[in-house]
Each structure stands twice: as C-alpha cells, then as structure tokens.
Amino acid sequence: MSSKNALDVSLHERRRIRRMEDQEFRVAYERTTREIEQTDQIIRELDAMRLDLGMSKAELARRINRNASSIRRLFTTNGSRPELPLIAAIADALGAEVRLMPKKSASKRSTHRRREPAAA
C-alpha cells in the first residue's frame, strides 16, 4: 500500500493518548491489552500444535463438533476472544491441556487462600 493510500490513524492515536491520561481508562486499557495478548498467544500455540500434528482446521472442527468456518476464523482473525470451553476442547483434541500459571512476580504470594471450616 502506498503512503498516499495509507489509512490516517493519527486522530485515533491522539485520542487514545489523551484518554490514557485518565487513570481508570488506562488501567482498563492495559488490562484488556494483556488479556488479548494472552489469548492470542494461546491461539498461536494451539495452531502450531495443530500444524505439527498435520491436522487441518476442518479435521479439528470435526473432532470438537464445531463449524469449520468458526475454527478457520479463530486461527486467522487477530484479537479473537474465544470462550474457555472452546480453548479446552481444542487443546484436548490436540492432545494437550490448559493450565493456569501464576505470573512470575505473583508466584511467591497466594492470591487464593483456603478457608478453614468454622469450629462448631
């Protein structure tokens, strides 16, 4: 695409920069960015596994009882936000499993503590 036909996004970028000055907006924006990055990473890893297994997108769709076009979109669209059950089904069909891992900076602290039953 020539620079003459390039889409001018400067207005949107200036607006985003201005909105980032709002603390609440910035926190939400950064959280959403992290969520999208993590989701995209999982999708890329699942697609790499599918390719390593020599499995077509259509075959994967058949194995998880989904429409082939939805699987094609999942692996070709940037920023898709699939539901966790779909991710788990794809991982299972590829012989993998989904696991949750703490961030390195949060690994030393527990974010969820078990409650002890109250004494009767």
Image (tube, rainbow, N blue to C red):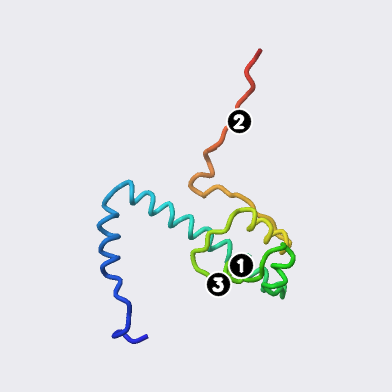
The residue identified by callout 2 is 114
Q: Which residue is mark 1?
A: 70
Earlier residue among tags 1 and 3 = 1
Sequence-first disc among 3 and 2: 3
Q: Amino acid at mark 1?
A: Ser
* On screen, residue 100 above or below 12: above
User: Percent x, y for residue 85?
Assistant: 64, 53
Percent of width and height locating residue 111: 53, 38
- The 10 Å Cα crowd at callout 2, few under 14, some 14 to 19, many 20 or more, is few
Name the foreground residue: 112 vs 93.
93
Residue at 64 percent across and 22 percent down: it is 117
- The amino acid type, in three-letter code, at marker 3 is Thr
Q: Is residue 20 left or right of residue 88?
A: left
Distance from Cα at disc 3 to Cα at disc 2: 41 Å
Closer to viewer: mark 1 or mark 3: 1
Name the spot of residue 7 as percent of width and height, x first.
Answer: 32, 77
Between circles 1 and 2, the one closer to the viewer is 1
Q: For the residue marked with disc 2, what is the amino acid?
A: Arg
Residue for badge 3: 76
Quadrant where the C terminus is found in the figure: top right
> Is the C-beta separation of discs 3 and 2 under 8 Å?
no
The residue drawn where x is 44% and y is 54% is 32
**Residue 63 in which image quadrant:** bottom right
Mark toward the viewer: 3 or 2: 3
Q: Residue at x 48, y 59 (%)?
A: 36
